[in-house]
Image: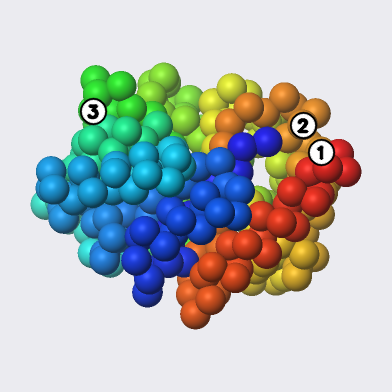
């Protein structure tokens, strides 16, 4: 199985430390979090792009994807007037270009909260328009645009595999694909919000499921906790990936809960998941 590190938890450290740890601890790749100080899309000029690519080459850790922040301030495709939407569209396009320049395989975004006053029909229309525009842009540049469902507390747009499949069907663009953050279906199932598992994502998305974010969960909140410290059935999830012949990347998404000790957390996470992998 191909495990990648995620640089979000290293935002108080250098990007080089994230690459070095990924190499030393045995990660197969790295997913770049597209925010300051490391890789904000509008900061990524030729000099900074070249510096990041040199880190990848020096530590022999490929950059698998680029994940900009686009579900809250200041960018959100789902809320605000037309000029605000256009600004967010322009930002994601720049992120797609950054992904290409970095040599990354994909750009990953989430559809943010649409506010409490939009109807479901209005939400669906805005999702479709956004993904039609961005999908066409990504396809022309040979990039994949991956859409991530968020939990019901984080957004009211795409929360489930069913809603993700609906959005992908509506745009029918080969460049627009889906992914599963395992915390989302697990927490929502635990809370009775949506009865979905990882198998549901495979059943509804098929080969359009191209990426996984994996970490543990307390079963109550959206917190991403160290593998082995929560209650999510991670071994069963890995068995599902194996049984489904999943050949994509699995990013260990620790985000910022361990921001004070990112190296220690990254090491513990991959060691635990590799141990589980040997059992399946």
Mark 1 / mark 3, whichever is N-terminal:
3
| For residue 147, above or below residue 85 | above
Front one among 107 and 276: 276
10 Å crowding of disc 1: few (<14), some (14-19), many (20+): some
Asked if residue 220 can be seen in this view, the reply is: yes
Mark 2 / mark 3, whichever is N-terminal:
3
Asked if residue 219 can be seen in this view, the reply is: no
Write down the quadrant of residue 267 in the picture: bottom right
Q: CA gap, disc 1 to disc 3?
A: 36 Å
Q: Which residue is mark 2?
A: 242
Q: Nearer the viewer, mark 2 or mark 3?
A: 2
Front one among 164 and 94: 94
Residue 166, position as x, y percentages in the image: 51, 33
Residue shown at 81% from the left, 49% from the top: 276
Q: Residue furthest front?
A: 58
Residue 188, position as x, y percentages in the image: 68, 58
Specify the color scheme: rainbow
Residue 69, position as x, y percentages in the image: 34, 57
The label shown at residue 101 is none
Q: Which residue is mark 3?
A: 137
Write down the quadrant of residue 135 in the picture: top left
10 Å crowding of disc 3: few (<14), some (14-19), many (20+): some
Front one among 3 and 106: 3
Q: Which residue is mark 1?
A: 239
10 Å crowding of disc 2: few (<14), some (14-19), many (20+): some
| SS category of the residue bearing label 1 | helix
Q: Are marks 1 and 2 in contact (CB under 8 Å)?
A: yes
Q: CA gap, disc 1 to disc 2?
A: 5 Å
Answer left or right for 7 relative to 70: right
Residue shown at 80% from the left, 51% from the top: 275
């Amino acid at each position: 199985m191909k495990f990648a590190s995620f640089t979000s938890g290293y935002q108080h450290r250098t990007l080089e430390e994230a690459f070095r740890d990924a190499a030393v601890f045995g990660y197969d790749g790295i997913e770049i979090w597209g925010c300051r100080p490391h890789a904000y899309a509008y900061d990524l000029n030729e000099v900074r792009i070249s510096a990041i690519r040199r880190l990848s080459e020096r530590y022999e850790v490929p950059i698998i994807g680029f994940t900009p922040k686009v579900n809250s301030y200041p960018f959100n495709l789902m809320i605000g007037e037309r000029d605000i939407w256009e600004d967010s569209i322009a930002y994601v396009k720049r992120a797609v270009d950054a992904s290409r320049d970095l040599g990354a395989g994909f750009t990953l975004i989430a559809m943010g909260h649409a506010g409490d006053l939009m109807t479901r029909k209005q939400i669906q229309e805005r999702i479709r328009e956004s993904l039609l525009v961005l999908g066409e842009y990504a396809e022309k540049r040979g990039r994949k645009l991956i859409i991530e469902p968020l939990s019901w507390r984080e957004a009211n747009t795409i929360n489930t595999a069913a809603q993700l499949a609906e959005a992908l069907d509506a745009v029918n663009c080969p460049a627009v694909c889906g992914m599963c953050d395992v915390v989302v279906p697990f927490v929502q199932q635990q809370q009775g919000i949506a009865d979905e598992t990882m198998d549901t994502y495979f059943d509804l998305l098929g080969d359009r499921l191209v990426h996984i974010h994996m970490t543990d969960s307390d079963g109550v909140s959206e917190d991403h906790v160290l593998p082995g410290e929560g209650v999510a059935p991670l071994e069963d999830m890995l068995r599902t990936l194996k049984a489904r012949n999943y050949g994509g990347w699995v990013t260990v998404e620790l985000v910022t809960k361990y921001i004070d000790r990112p190296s220690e957390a990254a090491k513990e996470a991959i060691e635990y998941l590799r141990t589980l992998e040997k059992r399946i």
